[in-house]
Image (tube, coloured by chain):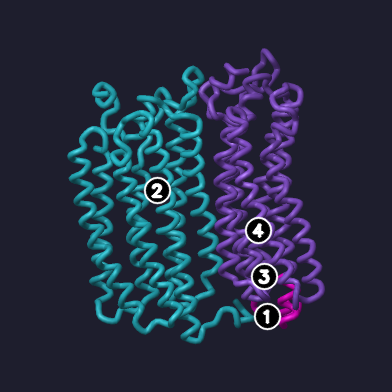
Chain colours: A purple, B cyan
Amino acid sequence: MDQLISSLGNATFENYVAADSGFTEMAYQMSAHVLTLGYAIMLAALLYFVLTMKTVAPKYRISSVLSVVVMVSAFLLLLVQQQNWTGAMVYDADSARYILGDGNDLFNNGYRYLNWLIDVPMLLFQILFVVTLTKSDFSSIRNGFWFSGTAMIVTGYIGQYYEVTSPTLFFVWGFISTVFFFHILYLMKKVITEGKEGAPAQAQKYLGTIWTLFLFSWMLYPGAYLMPYLFGGLEPALSETAVVARHITYTVADVSSKVIYGILLTLTAQEMSKAEGYDYEKLNDAI
Amino acid sequence: MDQLISSLGNATFENYVAADSGFTEMAYQMSAHVLTLGYAIMLAALLYFVLTMKTVAPKYRISSVLSVVVMVSAFLLLLVQQQNWTGAMVYDADSARYILGDGNDLFNNGYRYLNWLIDVPMLLFQILFVVTLTKSDFSSIRNGFWFSGTAMIVTGYIGQYYEVTSPTLFFVWGFISTVFFFHILYLMKKVITEGKEGAPAQAQKYLGTIWTLFLFSWMLYPGAYLMPYLFGGLEPALSETAVVARHITYTVADVSSKVIYGILLTLTAQEMSKAEGYDYEKLNDAI
């Protein structure tokens, strides 16, 4: 194992499992399929956000635009992430397993992380264009979102390079990242609480659902970060499960925090538009 | 080292580092991720500029069109630039490093340079369609932008071929390029100063921010050009850092000077449109 670590350097967990025991057909294919599902959902949802943009009043449409920005970047980065998976591994007929291909790039989750560098600020800004803040200052919340969002991702990105070679650095960077995450949770709670005041009843309900979804889906990311350790490290039988579980967790988290979140914001904005006299269903003219 | 230079010819710094010491997993992957982030942001922003085009009065929409032109060309050229990086290097299991692949294309930043041949004139013309010049002549400024912009890039493009083989030629071409750059700065300062006169207060604020952003982001390019020398040449430990730092610098510069600049021009045009009676948020119908 020590020899394996020195031969792979700061590569992620997935490569050590591939070099150590390889992946069964089932584990390799499940990963490839789940990664493909991820980027396909992003492109499909992109069309949804473009085509429903006019169901909300003009002042809310920037929320749909930001969802589109998130979908484009997530689509491209997750596509590359999937190609990185299939490009790293080759099928080895002798062992009937997928192993690292000679001279191929190693697999690295970093594509996801740098995608979040676009998505996280956009997703956090997005809700600010739908709700009306009653007490807090728009630009101070926006700057807080931007600063802590970026810091959370950059520190997590650095940490993930050490998940095998240096558990200490891995946990320290992960901890710093989590501090910024809690700051984001605190700000988001404030935004949603204030946003509910004065919103129509149905919009209030949607905002409550958004908070639950936000908590659930954003909590999945630290879970995926810690996945190698949740499953007991590099023990062969379990580590393959950890790799597949991580791909699935990231995909569920991405779809919930980007797509479902964006749809709920569209529904919220539709209710607010109606309350302000813009009822899409009753517009009969050139739209 | 001399042998390495003669064997690689006028190749860029990145290839000498790859041939000399190779790249660690972290340096190679960070470069691949940052290059991917770059083109993904361009495609995401392309959609932003298309979808927000009607938030400004018709006479300002050509600014959004020029942003779209810049996004398309930057997306394509940066995509090829990223593929050039991953296509040039291969993972070598013996040394646990990424090295030049046998028979593969070498890496060259020239894709970026030729992208700027489209982008630089477009970005400079763009602001001329938003502001109103009070003293200067529109076509003389436009021709100045076009001439110096093109000359700046072509001379820089030639210079970058000599960054390893002939430092003298590298610095001479870089110096000529910088002279044209200062002419552009002079013209831009004039455009922004005149543009502020008679603009609504909020638009004046945005124009002030655009000038700061312009200075900061365009200064990053000469910094990236000089990067191998800023980090002390081909000394192994530092040169890897210089390569990653250059990819990051170019990406930050591209996003700032193209995307954020374009968004700020859209916001400026929105303020001007409002002052002229075109208020997007109040239009409820056929938009």
Is disc 1 placed on a helix, strand or loop? loop
Q: How far apart are marks 1 and 2 (CA)?
A: 47 Å
Q: Is residue A97 above or below residue B25?
A: above
The residue mark sitting in front, 3 or 4, is 3
- Start and end of the magenta stretch? A269-287
Residue A145 x/y as whole percent: 60, 60
Of discs 3 and 1, which sits in the foreground? Answer: 3
Q: What residue type is labelled 3?
A: Val
Residue at (66, 75) in percent of width and height:
A135
Q: How far apart are marks 4 and 1 (CA)?
A: 23 Å
Q: Is residue B257 left or right of residue B146?
A: right
Does B37 sit above or below residue A131? above
* Residue position for label 1: A285
Q: Is residue A87 in view from this perspective?
A: no
Foreground of the two, B106 or B170? B170
In this figure, which residue is indicated by the disc labeled 2?
Answer: B250
Whole-angstrom CA distance, mark 3 to mark 1, is 25 Å
Q: Residues within 10 Å of mark 2 (few under 14, many from 20)?
A: many
Chain ID at mark 1: A
* Residue named by callout 3: A130
Q: Name the residue under label 4.
A: A47
Mark 2 to mark 3 CA distance (whole Å): 34 Å
Q: Where is residue B177 in the image (x, y as percent from the top left)?
A: 23, 52
